[in-house]
Image (cartoon, rainbow, N blue to C red):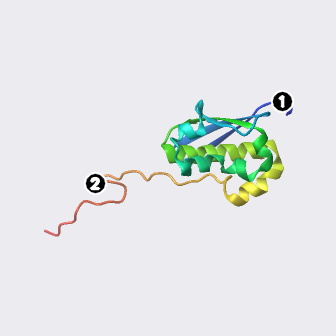
Amino acid sequence: MGKSEAIWATGRRKTSVAQVRILPKGEGKVTVNKKPVEAYFHGLPHQIRDVVEPIQIIEAAKNHDYIVKVVGGGISGQAGAARHAISRALVKLDEKNKKALKAAGFLTRDPRMVERKKAGQPKARKRFQFSKR
């Protein structure tokens, strides 16, 4: 893979899927669905921090721009999916990044999903009130 080529990676969380493209030259800008990360996540500090954390851990990552496309799920799932995708892309960029990102837990796909609603119940685990007679 040449140095001028963009690097692609996919990340997932809940029902969200994120595709990230790392551009070889840049100043660490993160664009989510054609908007700056701060605008896309409406200035929510927790979600913005989630997305940019892998870039802050890896010093060399600040020399690239990140274009993220996220679909499905909600704000929290999309932020987690973007973080997963960026982390995977940084490992593709340089295998030395794997140790730090793995230790931070960014390379693990979070398996938690919403439990399905069961028949005869109002929600997944909630029951209708029990009446003995």
Residue 96: x and y in percent read 83, 51
- Placement of 125 over or under 67, stated as above or below: below
Residue 93: x and y in percent read 80, 42
The answer to whether marks 2 and 1 mark residues whose Cβ atoms lie closer than 8 Å is no
Residue 95: x and y in percent read 82, 49
Residue at 72% x, 57% y: name it. Answer: 102
Mark nearer the viewer, 2 or 1: 1
Q: Amino acid at mark 1?
A: Ser
Q: Is residue 70 left or right of 26 when viewed as pictured? A: left
Q: Is residue 40 left or right of 131 when viewed as pictured? A: right
Residue at 71% x, 47% y: name it. Answer: 55
Q: Amino acid at mark 2?
A: Gly
Sequence-earlier tag: 2 or 1: 1
Residue 116: x and y in percent read 41, 51
Q: Provide the secondary structure element on which disc 2 rests.
A: loop
The C terminus is located in which quarter?
Answer: bottom left
The N terminus is located in which quarter?
Answer: top right
Specify few, some or many for label 2: CA neighbours under 10 Å numbering under 14, 14-19, or 20 or more: few
Specify few, some or many for label 1: CA neighbours under 10 Å numbering under 14, 14-19, or 20 or more: few
Name the residue that disc number 2 marks: 120
Kindly indicate the quadrant of the structure image that contains residue 17: top right
Name the residue that disc number 1 marks: 4
Residue at the farthest left position: 133
Q: Provide the secondary structure element on which disc 1 rests.
A: loop
Residue closest to the eye, 7 or 66: 66
